[in-house]
Image (cartoon, rainbow, N blue to C red):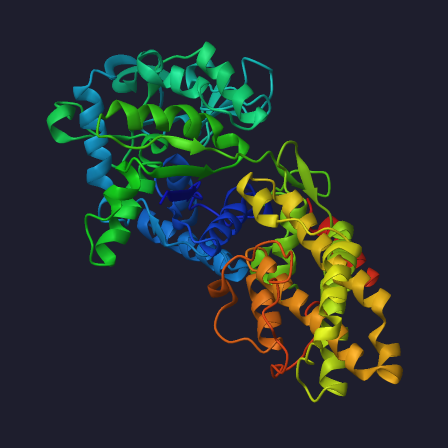
Amino acid sequence: MTRTLVTSALPYANGPIHFGHVIGAYLPADVYVRCLRMQGDEVRFVCGTDEHGVAITIGAEAAGKSYPDYVAGWHAVIQGTFDALGIEFDIFSGTSTCRHHAELSRDFFRDLDAGGYLIKEASEQLFCVPCDRFLADRYVVGTCPKCGHSPARGDECPACGEWLDPLELVEPACKVCGSEPERRSTTHWYLDLPKLRDARIGEWFQSKTWKPNVQAFVRGLLADLDKRPITRDMKWGVPVPEELAGDEEGKVLYVWFDAPIGYISFLKEWAEDIGEPDAWEAWWKGEDTELVHFIGKDNIPFHCLVFPSMLHGVGKGYVLPEAVPAMEFYNLQGRKFNTSTGWQIPLDTFFETYDADSTRFYLLSSAPETSDSDWRWEDFQACVNAGLADTIGNLATRVLRFCDKHFDGKVPPLQEAHRSELDAAILTECGEASDPAASIRRFRFREATSALLANAAIANVYIDRTAPWALRKTDLERCGSVLNTACEWLLLVARWMAPFMPTKAQSLWVMLGQEGPVEAAGWPELPSGAGWRQELGGTQLGEIEGLFAKLDDATVAAELAKLEAQAQ
């Protein structure tokens, strides 16, 4: 059996996450994992917060908090958002708290050095005299030398996306005090990416057939590759191994180097927690493991080039990614999410008003799979009202309440005389069902949501054509058989819903009189022939309730007005 190891990009513990982050790396992974598990696959889902780096130190110092307290606070906030959305990891740890992370990161450094893939050299770096410290890249702002955008960060331009060196910035300034830094000499280590590319990684990447946006991005990087610094002069981070640091004091591993190692150290922690400390190796070094990274567009270089280079360079037999289904950017009403300017949807209060499962479904249906897309309040309303409430919710309530009222709260029996006719009606005459799992496995989540709604719509067509409300007055047995068939279809809908909307799927499952978790029933095969039914006749229904509450125009208008009012 193939093992599937799924990771989501580590969220940075210096602020809340927004819906752009959620649909970029976490929700699609959660749906993928749930689907594979329902199909009987063995899967592990790993994530945690990225807790080192310059942005952490800047944020903590501005907040007047210690670095550990600062990251612990944001770790809890981010965990709370995942909990609210029903995103479930096998382990959700953190790079500063995982008991295996620091030493494993230093082991990577040692092994890469032993393999000849590290370069140690002196270079100039910007030093802020008033702050009395070398400035790591994100402590520096200036004008991008590539496109002229200002402000650009010392490591990357937010406008053109180019990797930058702080020394390249035009008119650089210290982000903390605003003064112009001076150049001083310091010694650092660099990852020899060109050597790793030529050793294997270039050929490995060319052998992959990934999403076009990923292929094009990395091909450009491979063509113009340079060594990349992996250490910084900072107090917060994983220290360089003492035996290699020598006289160089105050050197820590650059955050982009140690963060992805967290995928491994967190799984080591998981293995230890379950009492099988060596279990992680089968997932990270087994020939039958497929590694899948769920990330946003901005993480493509690290997960498709840098981290695979590190995994190969240490020579320990780590598996390389099988797929990296990167998403493009997800915006809010045509503009980028921006917490500092107020162009955001605060998630700490969002779920006090809006349903998490409906939100999951809308995000997936509008996912930025091949190009940038948007959260739009009016589209969220249409998705909930027409897509979910009318197509799935209305189907469930009108069928089950009819059964409850006219058949003593039970699924009516199927009369054998009607079996073949009604099978043909719902299986072929009212539409052709498709398998959402096939789309999920190809990372086509929009397509998968459409398939789910189309499958539910088949039963709506069936009910409209067979008109059980009319049959009740003329042929009660046939009426019961019609409703029995609809209930059988709803049972399939509940199982198809489970990866997308786990809570609503469970509610429908219970309304249909089923016990245990809906996921335990497994993923249903496409219904065909005479053996598709579960023979529900006589099953006592559970308490019937509406699945989806519609959103009115006034609610949407109020949200749009609030968004404009809070934006600076």
User: How many numbered marks have been drawn onto this rendered protein structure?
Assistant: 0
Residue at 46% across / 33% down in the picture? Answer: 323
The residue positioned farthest toward the front in the image shown: 417
Residue 525 in percent (x, y) is at 57, 55
The residue positioned 76% from the left and 50% from the top of the image is 379
> Relative to the observer, which residue lies in front, 142 or 323?
323
Q: Is residue 350 visible?
A: no
Can the viewer see residue 188 in this picture? yes
State the residue in front, 514 or 88: 514
Left or right? Give the position of 333 relative to 302: right
Residue drawn at (81%, 61%), measured in percent from left and top? Answer: 461
**Rendered position, 501 above or below 514:** above
Residue 432 lies, in percent from the top left, at 73, 51
Q: Quadrant of the C terminus?
A: top right
Above or below, 167 relative to 233: above
Residue 50 appears at what percent x and percent y? 38, 42
Q: Residue at x 31, y 44 (%)?
A: 95
Residue 117 sits in quarter: top left
* Viewer-closest of 285 and 30: 285
> In the picture, which quadrant includes the N terminus?
top left
The answer to which image quadrant residue 366 occupies is: top right
**Percent x, y for residue 84?**
53, 61
Tell me if 374 is positioned left or right of 69 in this view: right
* Up-down relation of residue 289 to residue 315 (above or below): below
Along the line of sight, the residue nearer the viewer: 122 or 348: 348
Residue furthest to the bottom: 408
Left or right: residue 288 compared with residue 317: right
